[in-house]
Amino acid sequence: MHRTVLLFSIIALYYSLATYGLYVFDAGLLVSALVLFGLPSLALAHFTVAPPLVVLSITMLGAGVAFLLEGIANMYGLWYSLGISQTRLFGLMPLEMLVAIVLQMLFLVLVYEVFFDDGVYTPRSAWQRLGFFVTFAVAIVVLIGLHQYVVNGIFLEYSYVWIIGVLLLSSMAVLVLHKSLSVTFFDRAIDFSLIASMPLGIFLWLSVANVFKVFGYPAAYMSTVSLFGQTVPLEEILLLFVIPFFVATVYEVYLDDAQ
């Protein structure tokens, strides 16, 4: 208990100083991601040891989520991410954003494992786990590619809500299909989502304040809200909680011990 309180205190101090420094020096996308997610991930990795293929699986999960978010955002004009160069992967997103979202996934998993779980991993084949996440990432890329290059004349209303719905319904489907997950896990996942939303919220605030993510299509948003002086879509606030819940659920079932 004392160790957890101490770690949370150190993390809170780190993020306070990091946020101030990143804002004052007008840090860009990659630097902000490395400071907010990369360095903390390295520190948290000392408290748990994940098999290498589990880490690779998380990387595939992050890549899939990155293409889902940035692909839909690019096609529907929900936001525009700015990197150091104008080069964009498949015309969708800066390479830095792919790195940033993968680092977010690694960070979220480590926070969940260190503070909310027991460090025990499932005995199932690591290659079996990797196969699921490679398939997930490839499927997302293929679907986004088909939508952009083959059936790009078909558009869905409220596309921002579709992003939230896909992640949330996927999480709920996992919970229903894997009945071994208890109410205790559900409560733990909610607590984790509340805590994990804070660093994600800092990154969102910096992305708007330092202008490496631009929200410029108000007609596509349900509403906009003020996040400490920065105007962001209401859907982005919802994603701060939905993404950690999705990560915790998928990770627990497919990479951890489903306890």
Image: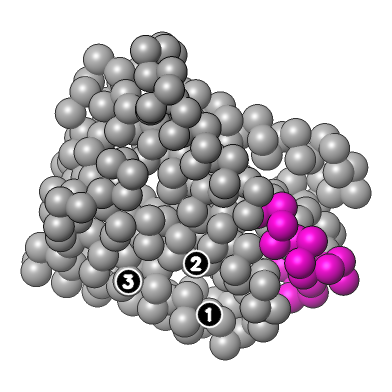
Q: Quadrant of the C terminus?
A: bottom right
Please report the residue visible at 51 percent of the width from the left and 55 percent of the height from the top.
Answer: 62
The quarter of the displayed image where residue 148 is located: top left
Vertical relation: 199 (above or below) 208: below
- Name the side, left or right, on which 177 lies relative to 34: right
Classify mark 1: helix, strand or loop.
Answer: helix
- Name the side, left or right, on which 122 lies relative to 138: right
Q: Nearer the viewer, residue 14 or 90?
A: 90
Looking at the rendered structure, the kind of residue marked 1 is Leu
Does the magenta-highlighted stretch encompass residue 126?
yes
Please report the residue visible at 75 percent of the width from the left and 61 percent of the height from the top.
Answer: 129
Mark 2 lies on residue = 107
Q: In the drawing, what numbered circle is on residue 44? A: 1
Please report the residue visible at 44 percent of the width from the left and 34 percent of the height from the top.
Answer: 145
Q: Nearer the viewer, residue 119 or 135?
A: 135
**Segment tinted magenta in the rendering:** 117-133
Question: Residue 168, position in %: x, y?
Answer: 61, 34
The quarter of the displayed image where residue 246 is located: top right
